[in-house]
Image (cartoon, grey):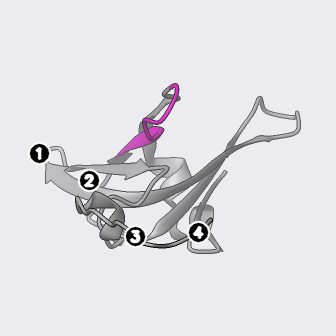
Amino acid sequence: TITLEGKDASLKNITQRIMSLTMTDNRGFEADRVTLEIDDADGGVVLPERGTRLSLAMGWKGESLTRKGTFVVDEVSHEGPPDKLTISANSADFREEFNVKREVSWHDVTV
């Protein structure tokens, strides 16, 4: 099951259009990543905007799903023909202040 910003993606026919789904579960401090390739031969898929939250749960048909996490869409691309959309999302939002190097220091402060 894929949920975009609290809306079930199957309502938008994304689930039925998935050509491939790759999830990379990185160790340590690296962000996990999900990449979806979606069939858009008829041009009927509405592209998610960068920053859209995507929740993923996977499992076998007829079994309970295992929640894999929430990811932030950071890249959407198109190629074709045949038309195919690639949506990539990270478990951390690299678009905002976390992606900026900064330094902070405190002087004469007790902990």
Asked where in the image residue 59 lies, by quadrant, the reply is top right
Q: Secondary structure at mark 2?
A: loop
Residue drawn at x 17%, y 44% as measured from the top left: 82
Mark 1 or mark 3: whose residue is earlier in sequence: 1
- Residue at the spot of label 3: 106
Q: Amino acid at mark 2?
A: Ala
**Which label lies toward us, 4 or 2?**
4
- Residue at the spot of label 1: 81
Asked where in the image residue 67 lies, by quadrant, the reply is top right
Mark 2 or mark 1: whose residue is earlier in sequence: 2
* Above-or-below relation of 49 to 30: below
How many residues crowd mark 3 within 10 Å: few (<14), some (14–19), many (20+)?
few
Q: Are marks 3 and 2 in contact (CB under 8 Å)?
A: no
- Residue at the spot of label 4: 110
Residue 80 percent location from the top left of the image? 12, 45
Q: Amino acid at mark 1?
A: Pro
Would residue 75 be found to the left or right of residue 6 on screen? left
Let me know if residue 44 appears in the view: no
How many residues crowd mark 1 within 10 Å: few (<14), some (14–19), many (20+)?
few
Front in this rendered view, residue 6 or 29: 29
Q: Amino acid at mark 4?
A: Thr
3D distance between C-alphas at marks 4 and 3: 9 Å
Q: Is residue 35 magenta?
A: yes
